Each structure stands twice: as structure tokens, then as C-alpha cells.
Amino acid sequence: MQSEFIPVENRTFDALRVIVHRATEKIMEGFQMCAGALAAARRIFTICLNRVRSQHRVIRFGIYTAVGTVALVLICVTVLVAAGIHHIYFDRTDLPDMEAFTRFEFPTIGHVYDTSEVPLIELARERRQITRYEDIPPVVRDAILAAEDKNFFSHNGVDYSRIPRLLSKVRVGTLLSRSTRQGRVNTRAIFPQGGSTITQQLVRDYFLQEITGRENSNQLRDGVLVTRALSLVIGARTVNMIMRKFEEIRLSFWVEEEMQKQFGSKRRAKEEILARYVSFIYMGDGQYGFGTAAQYYFGRPLSSFTVDDADKAALLAGIAKSPRDYAPRANETDRILHRRNQILALMAANGSISREQMRAASQRPILVVEQHNKMPQASAVVESALEELKVSHPELSIEDLLQGRIQVYSTVDARMQQIVNESLEHGLELYEKRHPRSKGLIQGYVVILKNGDASILAEAGGRQFYNGQSTSYSDLNRVTKSLRQPGSAMKPIVYLSAFDKGMFTLDTMAPDEPISVPDGTQRVKWISNYDGQFKGIIPLREALAESRNAVAIWLVEQIGINSVLSTSQSLGVQTPLHPYFTTALGASEVNLLELANAYRTMASGISATPYIVRRVVRNSGEVVVSNEHDGSRVDFDENVLALIQEGLRGVVRIPTGTAHALDSPGFQVAVMGKTGTTNDFRDALFVGSTYGPDGITAAVRIGFDDNRSLGPKETGARVALPVFKEMISRTYQEKLVGPAPEFPPPMEQNISLYLQANTLESKTAANTSPSAASELSAVSAKIQTEGLKGCAAAVIMRTEQGSPIDAQNQSTLSCDVK
């Protein structure tokens, strides 16, 4: 947007402006003459220098030439200054976009927050907090003005009173050295640094970053004739600096004009400019703005500073001059103290503080806080949030988060995230003790879902340090990106599909016998169990608890593999599964999130899609995303769901169950779940839940990224289950998700009766005759087949008393079996 110069109300000034404009055009025409004269002088000097041999004549000639050169330089500088006056005061073309500057939309810090609005992670290209003028304490304002620009509220962007002092610091010796090329070339800057007003510094850092960044190059930025000629004398770097300075001054006047138009008065415009300076300026150590610096260096919000913090305010104000030299973490503390105390003296001279306050503040040491990252590692959470936004709101991106334009509020609980991170590390350390060569190479990942709505409560896509590298901000999120075989963790889906057919219950007897499946060729593949044995006819409850492969394949033969695939889709598994029998044993690949969601659905009876973004808010306060996920009842009968829930609870409670380690005095949470171990022990898994919509579901996978074996006997129960155990135990001990739900009493009673019946059978095997044991086995089989009622207690009592089980007793007992 172009802007006119401040209008005047009399014609005299308009005429004067036209005269100056025309004069400037004439002056510009003299550029070529100056440049030609300068080049000619340099050629004459070179020729004469080659001819003159006498030392005295060389010196005298050098002096004459230097004087002439300086004169020519002054002429060119005069022309350049005249052109600069026109450019600064009259030229309002090629102006940058000021809209974001006016709206105070600076890049800030993007956050991903947890459910309690605790930051899980901070992302920023520039770590900055926006500080409004009213939030700048008077002591900080006074320190900034004393250090940088005491006349800030009176000038119009440039403080002319500083010019004589700056000219007095011009290094004339350096200018002569470069113009004559005599002796060693002096590389010091000809014109001194400093002297910029607050407005100029803000303009330079906000609008002229690219130009300033290329300023120190020996390549001339503007290749017009006069600048090329001048660069021959004072160097390209100095010319670049001069040209940047002209543009800086021009834009400073323009910014002050535009801000005054925007906010209605010079005072309000100045306040807004100062607020933008306080928010934008670099403060060292990756911090931008006084607000961020105050929190970073002193552990306090800037708004809390009072006159008693004059030493801290002066120290912050002194950083802007050179963050590398004056930031509190710089090496030379004496230099920092000297700079701070200088500013304190200026504040006292301006009347901002008393002499006594100045002396007291000058005596204080520099005390900065130690930096501790209190946020849990949550790179997987960030990636999941961004992936979710990419699908639901493609107009939002990582750049919006990095620029601080949006803030993301997640479903994750920071406390649970910390527990997940620590539990995973502890589990991996246990494995590394058994396999020292795998230290730092073994990987693990975890996700915890809320049963009621599938919201993600915690997610770790990998360990905190992998192969010697921190994964705090970026790593593969294996929870969603890694497709691996689930192993036996797939079997509950097979069982649920069978129960849904209405042909099977947990007490249905099934053959644990050698069984084969086609392998896609003319041959067949014989299925074996983990222990290499077969138990014969056993109830499905026992087959699930012990993870008998042969029984799982037998079930698929009865119901068809397509039923299993359909059930998996109903449970939320979206990855296409292979229509092979071995899919029942986990041969098809899935990611950990959809496997966890399948178990969550079985535990709660609620169908829902996992999500992690609750809300997204722009810096303006506009809510652009608001997620309230309400699940729906899953398409399974409640009795069918109760069967799989009881079966998975049995995996924990039955002594031969693969997860029986969770049924111990040291673990007081009632859970259900299933282990998984893939071929050749490549992956170890455990997925488990507490009961119902008020419970939670956690999935753990341990394995190498290159798919190598974990080693013999490194099963899901041994490797992954300890991680689950620690996570769930700590989560409920710390009351992060409420009390652990209890399983329905009928489920627990059915499992107890089964265990009692098994105890009975074991005792009679040792204490009764073969014929009585045979009769008891028949009764036990009938009980397990048709259901358990009160007769089980009578069977146990009679056996313990040594009473024989005859045909009459068997008949009597069978009357009570339902």
C-alpha cells in the first residue's frame, strides 16, 4: 500500500517540494561525471605512482592524491545524500506490506496443550510472546528508553540530535587507508554502529532482515553507477550499509506516519511501536521479545517487574545492542555487568530511579534460573494432531503452529504421557539387561485410549533416545505409521466373530489337535502351538487364555475367514487384512492404534474413531476446530460382547493364561487383555483394558525397527506386559482417570467356578482311583460344556471328603447343570 508524505496546507511548501525534486534530478545527472572523475583520478594515480621513484615525491604525491580523492568522495557523497533526501522524504514507492505489522501478528510460539492446558510441547521458528504496551512495567519502559532512545516519544522516527555524535566517530584514517590503498588495508568499519532509534531498529529487524543479512557481503547489493564508484573507495560492505541505512530511515518515517493514521495520535502510535519492539527484538539464546526473555532468564513474567527489579530491567534492555555479548548466559560477565550498570546510571540521570536505587541495583549479582524442560516428550502427539488436522482441516498446517498462529488443545493428559514415557523406558531397560548389545537400539511404542470415546490419553511413538539421538521433537510415530503383525493379539477378534455366530460359548469344547492350512501352493502348512504340544479337547475359555494356535485355526474353519475380516472392520481395523487362515494368528499387518481401538471397542461396546485434537484456537481467539466425539453402540449383541470380555478377563485370571502375571497382589487393577508374539520373536505385544466405557485401553509393542528377532522366549508376556503393568498401576494409583471399574460379578463368578472345577480335577487326578477320576472327568466335561451352577461346590466338597462319584451322584449333579 502506497502512502503520501504528510500533507501541508500552504502552496509554498508544495512549490519547494517541486524545486527540490527537480534539483535532485539534476544532481542525479551528475553521478556519471563524479564517477568518471573518480575513475580518472585513480588511473592517473596508478600511472604516476609507477613513474615516481623518489620516496619523498611518492609521499607528497600520495598526499595530493588522497586529498583529491577525498574531495571527489565528498562530492559523490553529497550527490548521494541529495538523492537520499529525495528517497527518504518524498519517495513512497516499493513499500512493504504493513498489514501484519499493524495487526500485531508477529510469529510467536505454537503450543500443543493437554486436557488441563498444560503445554506438552512448544514449537516456534522464533520463541516469542506478544507483550501489549499496558503489560510493559514502567521500570522496563524506562530502562529501554534510557538504553536505546531517550527521545523516542518526541521524534518522528529519526533522532537528528544523534547525527553530530555519529559523524564525530567516523574513522577517517580507515577511509584514507582504503582510498589510497597504502599500507595494510584496514578492515574496520568506516561508519560506527549504533545511533538507531527504537523505530529504526524495529524496521531493520522486521522489514529489512534479508537486506541486513546480506549487508556484510563484499558483493555490492545495488549496482547503480554511483554506488559502484563509491565502493571503489570505501568498499562494498560500507556502501551496502549506507544504502540499507537510507532505506531504514525512509521506512521509519513511513511506519510512524502510518501508525499515527491507524491509532489517531502520535502518543498512541508511539506506544504501539514500543510494544512491537518489546515483542519482536532478539534477546539471545533463541529467545525473542522481552516477555520470553524475562521468563527464560529470570523465571518470571515481565509484567511482574517493579522498581525493585531495576537491575533485571536494565540487563534486559542492554541485550538488544548485542545479544551475543550482553545476554546473561554470555561468557564475559564483567562486560554484561558494565553494560547493565551504565543503563542504571542513565535511568538515574533521567529520574526514573533514585541514586540510592541505582547503587543498590548495581551491587546485585546476575542471577539467572536453570533451564529444565518440564514438558513430557510428546513428538508422537504432535504428529498425530497435525495428521488429524490435515484430514479434517487442510487449511491448517505445521507452519501455522510454528508461527504461533494457532494453539492446539489435545485429549492427552501430560501426567499420563510422562508415565507412558517412563514405563516404556523401564521396560526397554529390562530387555537391555538381558541383551546388552541391544542397548539404545531396541524400540517400543505405546498408546492409551479412553474407552468411552476413543480419545487418545497418551501416545509414545518410540523411545526418548534412540541410537544415541534424542527424539524429543521429531521421530517416526510408530503407533500410526508402522504396520507390523499383531501375532496372537489378533485371536480375540476371531473368538468374537465365532461368538457372534451364536454357535459357540466360552465353555464350548474345541479340539487342540494338529491342523493344517493351505499355504497357497500344492502343499499345506501344519499349525503348532507355542509349547509344541496339543492338549486334545479343551474349552474355548482355556484355548483363548493359553493362546492355542490350533484352536484359533479350527474356529476359522467353522465360521470362515470372511467373518473374521468383517468383525475386524466392525471393531475399527481399517488396514485391509489378507483373506488367509493365518490372519487368525496375526499374519496380516496392522498398526498399533487400530489394534488398540479394536480392544477398546470390545471392552466398552462403543464404536468410535480415535482422535487427539479437542480444540484449535487462533491467536485472535477464534475457535476454528471443536471436537466433541460421541460414540455409538457397536453392532454386537451385549451377550456376545460379555463372552469376549469374560474370555479376555480369563487370560489374566486363569493360572495358565499368558497374562496371569497381572493377577497378583502387587497389581490391584482388574484388567482384561491379550499377549501377542510374532514369528521368530520379532515383536512382543500386549493390549489390555479396564472394563466398560469408564475404563481405558493400552497397547504396547516392543521390537526392532529392522525386524530382527528379540531372541528366544522374548514373548509378549515377558517383554511388553511389564510396560503395561507399570503404566496402568501408576495411572490408577495417582487417580488420573478415576477409580478402576470392576468387572460384572457374574463374569468373575464364572471364571472362579471354572478355576474351582480345574482345581477339583487336579486333586482327584492325584487322590482317586482311575475309574473315579474318569467319572469325575466326565462330570467336569459336562459342567464345562453346559454351564456352571451351584453343583460345582458340591462336587468339590464331596471330592475333598473322599466321597465316590457314582452314577447316581452324577445324575443328581447333572440336574443342577444349566
Image (tube, rainbow, N blue to C red):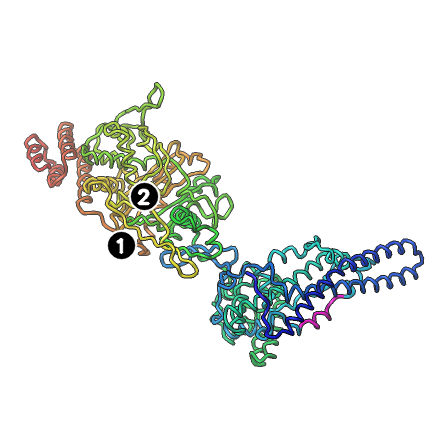
Name the residue located 34 percent from the left edge and 37 percent from the top edge. Answer: 676
Name the residue located 76 percent from the left edge and 62 percent from the top edge. Answer: 76
Say which label, 2 or 1, has the lower sequence index. 2
Disc nearest the viewer among 2 and 1: 2
Check disc 2 and report the residue beneath it: 597
Quadrant occupied by the N terminus: bottom right
Q: Amino acid at mark 1?
A: Pro
From this view, report whether residue 154 is shown above or below residue 246.
below
Check disc 1 and report the residue beneath it: 739
Q: Which residues are magenta?
A: 162-171
Q: Nearer the viewer, residue 22 or 416?
A: 22
Q: Circle 2 sits in a helix, a strand or a loop, which is it?
A: helix
Q: Nearer the viewer, residue 448 or 764?
A: 448
Q: Position of residue 496 (x, y in %)?
A: 24, 37
Which of the 4 image quadrants contains residue 62? bottom right
- Magenta-colored segment: predominant secondary structure: helix
